[in-house]
Amino acid sequence: ILNVEQSPQSLHVQEGDSTNFTCSFPSSNFYALHWYRWETAKSPEALFVMTLNGDEKKKGRISATLNTKEGYSYLYIKGSQPEDSATYLCAFRGSGTYKYIFGTGTRLKVLA
Amino acid sequence: DSGVTQTPKHLITATGQRVTLRCSPRSGDLSVYWYQQSLDQGLQFLIQYYNGEERAKGNILERFSAQQFPDLHSELNLSSLELGDSALYFCASSVGTGAYEQYFGPGTRLTVT
């Protein structure tokens, strides 16, 4: 059974703090890893699609790195703002399949 | 607005009934994915279609079926509904079957009473 784990489950940070969280996935047969931002009462919004080992992607204050050999990806948020409050989800896809396995998410609350 | 539409937004029905959820992908997207979000579970992949053909099946029950039509819209049919089928059902679309961004619709909230 393939497992995708995210940590921490939730965290509270102060406005202006930088933070990061982890997505762990199977290190063999990697195809792609997706990161999503999911605000309450809305639908998941795509942040990054990562495919290559060592990939680093950035969108504004949010960036992500990928290590397929050891099976993890980090999402970083620099200078957190209250509007960054959301659940951050990762989804793993192995090679030879079209199926996606989602982690349970990291719930971020940024306090003003 | 992702460009993906789902109808209806909310659906309340009784156990044993059958419902159809509808999804229209973003213009130009050929792939459609269906996901289920239950109260106590994360997002679960149900099924994927690409240009009218089924490409992958996830944890989809036999009571559930889906199809993608020539105009690329998709329908998810849920039959013999049980209380445990109450969930938020999302549809997402992408341009193809590779590692492309998926755009999620607003979801359909199904309540089975």
Image (spheres, rainbow, N blue to C red):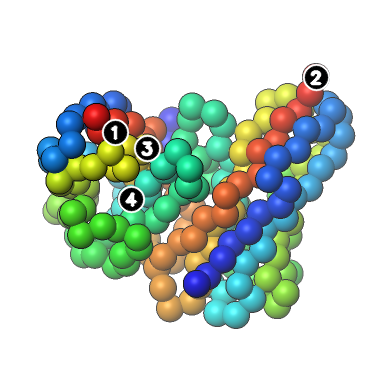
Amino acid type indicated by mark 3: Leu
**Mark before the other along the chain sequence, 3 or 4:** 4
Q: Mark 4 vs mark 1: which is more N-terminal?
A: 4
- Looking at the image, residue B46 sits to the left or right of residue B42; the answer is left
Mark 4 highlights which residue? B34
Q: Badge 1: few (under 14), some or many (20 or more) residues near its Cα, within 10 Å?
A: some
A103, B33: nearer the viewer: A103
Where in the figure is residue B75, as x and y percent of width and height? 19, 46
Task: From the top left corner, tell me how far across and down residue A37 is, in percent.
Answer: 59, 40
Q: Is residue B69 above or below residue A27?
A: above
How crowded pointer 4 is (Cα within 10 Å; few <14, some 14-19, many 20+) is rated as many
Left or right of A58: which side holds B42?
A: left
Judged from the image, the secondary structure of the residue bearing numbered disc 3 is strand
Give yes or no for contact between labels 3 and 1 (Cβ–Cβ under 8 Å).
Answer: yes
Q: CA distance from mark 3 to mark 1?
A: 6 Å
Residue type, numbered disc 1: Leu
- Name the mark on residue A112: 2
Q: Are marks 3 and 4 in contact (CB under 8 Å)?
A: no
Label 3 to label 2, Cα distance in Å? 31 Å
Residue B5 visible, this angle: no
Q: CA separation, marks 4 and 1? A: 14 Å
Q: Residue at x 71, y 52 (%)?
A: A7
Callout 4 amino acid: Trp
Q: Which residue is mark 1?
A: B110
User: Given this view, does label 3 or label 2 mark the residue nearer the observer?
Assistant: 3
Which one is in front, A15 or B4? A15
